Image: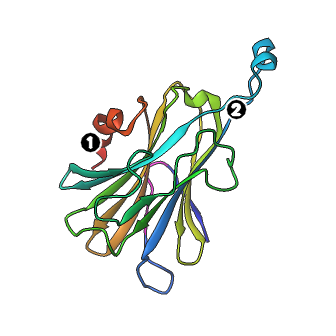
Amino acid sequence: MSINLNKGQQISLQKADGNALTTVRMGLGWQAAPRKGFLAKLTGGGEIDLDASAILFAGGEPVDVVFFQHLTSDDGSVRHTGDNLTGGAGTGGDDESILVDLTRVPTHVDQIVFTVNSFTGQTFAEVQNALCRLVDETNGTELARYTLTGGGRHTAQIMAKVRRGPGGWQMQAIGEPSTGRTFQDLLPTITPYL
């Protein structure tokens, strides 16, 4: 059963049988909002290039990143499945996915923060049906979903993080709007959530 996360809500990444998850997929889906007016008829439907990134932190410092130009973490535990330049899945499936093998994440990495940014610079007012979801990759079960709502003039969002704790991994929905075209632009916004 999937949980619809609210901003700031946290869930444990333990299976119902008490076992820990081994591999999770953070999926990102979106659609371009329909354009209105005379120019929309001339230019047709919009395409928006949102990019999913995963930034690995150790003790509050970034130590690695997975994004469209670096598809696999240096240790191989986190892997991006590839860049989608237009979106389209929206409320259905994933347009971009990042796979995390929690059993292979190095012990010094204590948090992985997932972000989304508009590489082409459109604001989230031009995006609809954007979502971030966490899936148990071993059986395809959706564990949690965070819906990006409200549009807005921002071009990025700090979506969620997974954090290593004494009882195993936990996921927290962050949902903090930000501005930036790349994950580097978002680092000052991420810092308060570490």
- Horizontal side, residue 166 vs residue 13: left or right: left
Position of residue 117 relative to residue 193, above or below, is above
Look at the numbered disc 2 and give the secondary structure of its residue: loop
Which part of the image, by quadrant, shows the N terminus? bottom right
Region of the chain picked out in magenta, as a range = 7-12
Q: Residues within 10 Å of mark 1 (few under 14, many from 20)?
A: few
Disc 1 marks which residue?
Answer: 191
Disc 2 marks which residue?
Answer: 33
Position of residue 8 relative to residue 142, above or below, is above
Look at the numbered disc 1 and give the secondary structure of its residue: helix
Q: Nearer the viewer, residue 90 or 15?
A: 90
Which residue appears at 38% of the width and 62% of the height? 78
- For residue 145, the mark is none
**Image coords of residue 22 (percent x, y):** 42, 76
Q: Residues within 10 Å of mark 2 (few under 14, many from 20)?
A: some
Chain-order first, disc 2 or disc 1: 2
**Image coords of residue 188 (percent x, y):** 28, 35
Callouts 2 and 1 close, C-beta under 8 Å: no
Identify the residue at the far top of this view: 38
Q: Nearer the viewer, residue 177 or 10?
A: 177
Q: Is residue 174 magenta?
A: no
Q: Label 2, label 1: how many angstroms apart (C-alpha)?
A: 31 Å
